[in-house]
Amino acid sequence: MHAQLSRPPGPDHEVSEIMSPFLPDSLTGIASDFHDATNRNLLERWQPLCDWLDTRLRDGFDPACKVNTVRIGARALAQDRRGRMLSGVNLASLDPLNISTHPKVLAATQDAAARFGIHSAGSAAMMGLTSLVVTLEQRMATFLSMRDALVFPTGADALHALFRTLVQPGDHIILDSLAAPGLRDLAEIATRKVHLAHHLSPASVLDHLEKIRAQEPDAGILVMMEAMSYADCQSPDLVTLQEMCRLHEATLLVDTALDLGSTGPGGRGVLGLQGLLGEVDLVSGTFARAFASNGGFLACNHPALRTAIVQGSLVHWSSCAISPLQAAAILAALDLIDGMEGDWRRRCLLRNCRAFRQGLAKQGYNVLGEPGSAIPVLLGAAAVARRMTAEVLYHGAVVNLLEYPIVPQGGARWMLHPMADHSAEDVDTFLALTERARRFAV
């Protein structure tokens, strides 16, 4: 069914009302439709995509690359790529516990700037480390009950270094079929032998393990699972997966990007909830969500990992180490997360997450997964999702829309990020907007 736009999305009313049953270009198509692969000019291949995205932006249907203009908090003041103002309830920023502007975090970064300056001035394999980074690595190992931890500029850098160091071209990687697209891209850089297991299915993982071992008994196998799936905020049975990996001499890597710090006892995420702290082979994650700074990490119980990555990873040699300010911010955030205030902030986050989820479900939205630091709201067809997003975005809330290829085609969704500091008024304001947006979509 073709939806009709009943009113323009932008606050400046630049978009004419659409009375035709035919959808405009800005509501149709996907990014891959606008890539001219036949053009021999590598840059010109992308011009149709740029034109299409500019049309979407003009019509108010491109929510990407929003520009924040104030501190991150429960309310946002931002701009779209065209400079139009966006303001209201902030469900688009990654700061679930609202500690990125905590006084203790700010004070720690100021002290680090005065002591070390603001630049690491080198890679971690050469002269880029500071004592703050060394302390952070020790603290993260303790936090996760692991033997060792290494810190990287980003979570993607950590995984890139791991894949390129551990996995040889003849080795195999098993991924969940709904793993974040970036994880699949990184895996395919390391080996062509990437296998997709059915979503959250230990039986499917076991089937891949048995077939690989039967055909290539001496090959290395890495099984990578998200502790909480980015697609739908559900968690796999990590206990069963670790047992299967040990039985078949495979290595289990658990990525904690979505849950660590913001969920579970003491902020230990799904690993803590499933009683697996210190038990899985490898743990990866990012500091960018709950820990107030860019950065990523790897943790492992095997004594050879640090040497292997430091000596064998180009990422560790060629990328600047995280700055003293970033390390100081993460350490201060870790103190908060691991203390009584962290427990209180996680309770507030969980309360608000449940309130948003219950209200959306009551309105008839398809809300996926379990309560946590993100709320996937399945909207379906891209045209409807873009219209609903515009209605919310330009009238009182800031949200993110995920479309193909980030999510399956026809599975466009909001990825909402509740915060500990959201008030009951914030919840009510957002739910009033989503109720109105749902009316416009039918």
Image (cartoon, rainbow, N blue to C red):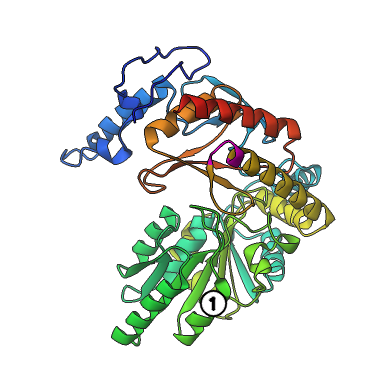
- Picture coordinates of residue 177 (x, y %)? 40, 61
Residue lying at 69% horizontally and 35% vertically, measured from the top left: 73
Q: Is residue 166 visible?
A: no
Q: Is residue 333 left or right of residue 10?
A: right
> Residue 173 sits in which quadrant?
bottom left
Q: Residue at x 45, y 69 (%)?
A: 201
Reply above or below: 117 against 53: below
Residue type, numbered disc 1: Thr
Name the quarter where the N terminus is drawn: top left
Looking at this view, is 176 or 286 the one in front? 176
For image coordinates 53% across by 39% down, the residue present is 365
Tell me if residue 30 is in the magenta stretch.
no
Residue situated furthest right in the rendering: 340
Q: How far from the left and from the top, in percent, is residue 327?
A: 68, 54
Q: Is residue 227 above or below residue 105?
A: below
Left/right of residue 218 with respect to residue 87 in the rendered view: left
Name the residue at 47% across, 58% down: 318
Instruction: Mark yes or no: residue 404 visible.
Output: yes
Judged by its main secondary structure, the magenta piece is loop
Mark 1 sits on what residue?
240
Q: Position of residue 241 (x, y in %)?
A: 51, 75
Q: Quadrant of residue 179?
A: bottom left
Image quadrant where one finds the C terminus: top left
Q: Position of residue 20 (x, y in %)?
A: 31, 17
- Classify mark 1: helix, strand or loop: helix
Magenta residues (range):
361-365
Number of marks drawn: 1
